[in-house]
Image: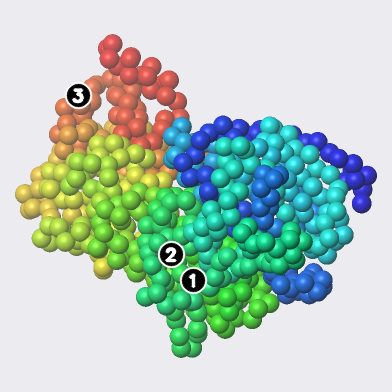
Amino acid sequence: MSEAAVQPESHEFQAEVSQLLNLMIHSLYSNKEIFLRELISNASDACDKLRFQALQDDSLYAGDNDLKINISLDKDAGTLTISDNGIGMTHDEVITNIGTIAKSGTKEFLQSLTGDQAQDAQLIGQFGVGFYSSFIVASKVAVVTRKAGTDEAFRWESEGTGRYTLEATERDTRGTDVILYFRDEDKEYLDDWRIRGIIRKYSDHISLPIMMLQEANEASEETEQDKDQQVEWEQVNNTTALWARAKKDISDEEYKDFYKAVAPDFQDPLAWTHNRVEGKQEYTNLLYIPSQAPFDLWDRDKMHGIKLYVNRVFIMDDSEQLMPKYLRFVRGLVDSNDLPLNVSREILQSNKLIDGIRSGSVKKVLSLLESIAKNKPEDYKAFWKNFGAVLKEGPAEDFANKETVAKLFRFSSTREDSAEQNVSLDQYIGSMKPGQDKIYYLTADTYMAAKNSPHLEAFKKRDIEVLLMCDRVDEWMMQYLNEYDEKKFISVAKGDLDLGELDSEEDKKTAEEAEKAAEGVIERLKTALGDQVESVRASSRLTDSPAVVVLNENEMALHMQQLMKQAGHEVPVSKPILEINPTHNLLTRIEAEQDEQVFADWAQLLFDQAVLAGGGQLENPSEFVKQLNKLLLS
């Protein structure tokens, strides 16, 4: 043992942890009892980790493979102790897991606080800051821990004042003790029956036995020595794996309580699906849809959600092989009867059994979402608001279920005067105009930019619905979502606009005449703009605006090009097509200009404003303003 580990050490918490501790200590939460749930969950995780590591190294058990959690009360000292014989921690692991935000998500937790104490308390489980909930009820917390396979033990202690001490100590066996020194106002938690009730409420499903000492019979005339000899540990929880029970025997409240422990989350789940699969493969899954988005939802590299069990033995947490990334918000577990107990992440990556489990689990989740959308539309609105943008990653990631996933999508539309995304693809197709065989859409940076885009003018004139896609993922998603229900997707801002049967013969004739009449100004604009544009042509898109920029079908939208540049990515140089409205008064004014230099200034102004209206940004905004002022003054 190093000299630094032997001598008592004094450390400061990271700033975010100090803020969190201050919050815990000085705020009055309406549901303080959650501290016990969180600490029992941590103890259970420690035992699960030992069980998994012992599959490779049985010596870690050191002859004691009876994993359990002991909870004891000392009314005289005012303490509660949660002890486990799990994996334990080393000196450095104590600092990492308790003294810093590396494992806690504390920084994001603090950024999400609302000032509403009851609501903020709900965030504890969501952000994995469960250990710190000890300070809701304790004036001091001590942790005594010894890593399995080592002889060194350490004692961590803090009063939540921004500092903690860490020193070497003694512990006879591996594992961890968490000792809470209750504040005077919270000594109600020294009541044996109160603690037992909390355990049954939140932790009854824990697969490990949770043990408490039997209370001695105070009415007995036996001596204190006799009482001490008769005191025994007894199991408080029933340790039955909830997912292994028949669905008809499980109440909704039990499902909800189990979710709060397995997620972890303090809110009730939005919905869940519980399935037992038999046949070539045998497995059980219990999968939940949260009612709120976790803080790390957009971290695609983080492992999420699904726990893997084999014959009710915990194998690993956050198994990314069991659920695709676009469903990373799903929480729950899979228990397989067919996998070996010593299965590793490497084995999972190329295991056909896992592929089958994953495929079946994905179908169950998508079916559940479809059922919510059909039967509980208000619940589905809440789901879509939280997770819709993540679900849109599906077409790129899950080709086999692309149409099923797309059926769940919701969009804004030109038919609704609202930014809410309420229109499904089935609804869009159901309201198509006679003769329409395509799904028209427009991507933009914001709803207002989409709603007011000049690209929509021809569609508004003909009362053709256009889907407005304003999430940043939409432009990327549409590279993979080419059609739905045999209807092709067409961007109204890209390529040639061919409305087919939706265009009357009169409209077609008028467009041809306008284009022929504009040949002269089109050639002059091409010359003036040079290589800024691929071409200039008369537009069938416009009714009110003088001009619009149009991209080729495979090019990235202007607002996405700008975002990619800001993120430091190389973006191919794009030469848009400038489409003009020959009947607009501004074009009439420009065409009448005889001075070619002044005409060139007007041409540049026309092009720049079309770029802006199309969601792009100008390379030189100040030059645009200067040019505009010059022309206004003339």
The residue mark sitting in front, 3 or 1, is 1
Q: Residue at x 73, y 69 (%)?
A: 53
Give the mark nearest the N terminus, 1 or 2.
1
Query: Mark 1 falls on what kind of element?
Result: helix
Amino acid beneath label 3: Arg
**Percent x, y of residue 301:** 58, 55
Left or right: where 214 falls relative to 62: left
**Percent x, y of residue 365:** 40, 67
Q: Residue at x 34, y 32 (%)?
A: 612
Q: Are marks 1 and 2 in contact (CB under 8 Å)?
A: yes
Which residue is identified by label 2? 254
Amino acid beneath label 2: Glu
Image quadrant containing the C terminus = top left
Q: Quadrant of residue 181?
A: top right
From this viewpoint, which residue is outermost toward the top?
Answer: 633
Give the mark nearest the N terminus, 3 or 1.
1
| Crowding near the residue tagged with mark 3, few <14, some 14–19, many ≥20 C-alpha atoms within 10 Å | few
Gap in angstroms between the C-alphas marked 3 and 1: 77 Å
Note whether 590 is above or below 429 in the view shown: above
Note whether 13 is above or below 289 in the view shown: above
Query: Mark 2 falls on what kind of element?
Result: helix
Which residue is identified by label 3? 589
Q: Residue at x 79, y 69 (%)?
A: 60
Gap in angstroms between the C-alphas marked 2 and 3: 74 Å
**Percent x, y of residue 141:** 69, 43
Left or right: where 458 falls relative to 342: left
Which residue is identified by label 1? 242
Amino acid beneath label 1: Leu
Query: Mark 3 falls on what kind of element?
Result: helix
